Image (cartoon, rainbow, N blue to C red):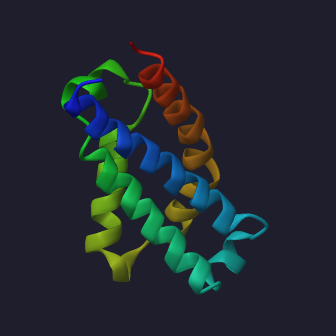
Amino acid sequence: MSKLNREWYFYIEDMIGFAEKVIVYTEGYSQSEFVLSGLNYDATVRNLELIGEAATHIPEEERVTHPTIPWRQMIAMRNRLIHGYLGIDNDTLWSIIETDIPALLPELCLLQQEITSKP
């Protein structure tokens, strides 16, 4: 693998780890319990921010090649969470946690497998 491929590959690995943390940190919570959870809420929001930040480091040609991964939405989510911390919509946040992250994780794992299987 070239240095460029190795570099962005690590961001995919990071994104997988962050997504797994979101799932673990929210497991067993209802939305209302999660919103009141304190540490779990904060840690989850932080990991969602990190997913979006890592997505900014994926080269555009790779994003185009993998259109099933919502790159722009992840980056937009990061920007909203970081810049709108007093105005986080918990319904939207919970939808991301319950629907988007579980759908994203296998897509990222497939991409990781694709990358590691290249000569």
* Location of residue 48 by image quarter: bottom left
Identify the residue at image location x=52%, y=25%: 113
Quadrant of the snapshot with the C terminus: top left
Residue in front for this viewpoint, 110 or 92:
110
Q: In this view, does 30 lie above or below 101?
A: below
Compared with 66, 98 (above or below) is below
- Could you tell me residue 75's position as x and y percent? 30, 50
x 30%, y 23%: residue: 1
Q: Is residue 89 visible?
A: no
34 on left or right of 44: right
> How far across and down, in percent of the image, does residue 20 sit?
60, 53
Instruction: Determine the image quadrant of residue 81.
Output: bottom left
Q: In which quarter of the image is residue 46?
A: bottom left
Location of residue 114 in the rendering, given as x and y in whole percent from the top left corner: 47, 20
Q: Which residue occupies the foreground of this view, 71 or 109?
A: 109
Q: Which of 108 and 92 is in front in this view?
A: 108
Q: In this view, does 30 lie above or below 18?
A: below
Task: Locate residue 10 relative to residue 109 in the image: left or right.
Answer: left
